[in-house]
Image (spheres, grey):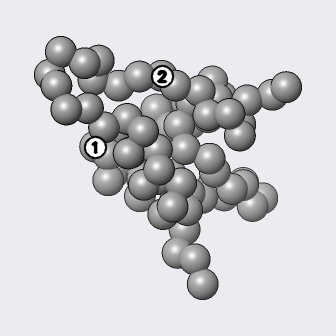
Amino acid sequence: MVEYLSEKALAKRWGIDFRTLQKWRCQGIGPPFIKIGIAVRYTPQSIKKFEKEHMHSATNNRRFSHKKNSSTTKK
């Protein structure tokens, strides 16, 4: 069984406000999510993939790139 993280749990993990995640979802930014009713959940796999894609090894790289998630972008 997959353990899903709520938006508040993910926001706490990343040290950001949960409203930032809400804003990102509206903009197509951030990891893929599942919406069940009004509840938004994230899988550990999607979070780890997103974190890996945004990992930087040099300080001159941008702190966070607003890379849109292709699975949430409308076509």
- Around disc 1, counting alpha carbons within 10 Å, would you say few (fewer than 14), some (14 to 19), or many (20 or more)? few
Would residue 5 be seen by someone viewing this image from the given angle? no
- Around disc 2, counting alpha carbons within 10 Å, would you say few (fewer than 14), some (14 to 19), or many (20 or more)? few
Image point (73%, 29%), residue name: 73
Up the image or down, 4 lies above or below 71; here it is below
Image point (72%, 55%), residue name: 35
Q: Quadrant of the N terminus?
A: bottom right
Q: Quadrant of residue 75?
A: top right
Image coordinates of residue 65 in percent, x first then y, are: 41, 22
On the picture, is 71 further left or further right than 19? Answer: right
Point out which mark residue 34 bears: none
Q: Earlier in the sequence, mark 1 or mark 2?
A: 1
Q: Secondary structure at mark 2?
A: loop
Residue type at numbered disc 2 = His
Disc 1 to disc 2, C-alpha distance: 17 Å
Disc 1: which residue: 15
Marks 1 and 2 in Cβ contact (< 8 Å): no
Q: Secondary structure at mark 1?
A: loop
Farthest residue to the front: give it.
57
Farthest residue to the bottom: give it.
1
Point out which mark residue 66 bears: 2
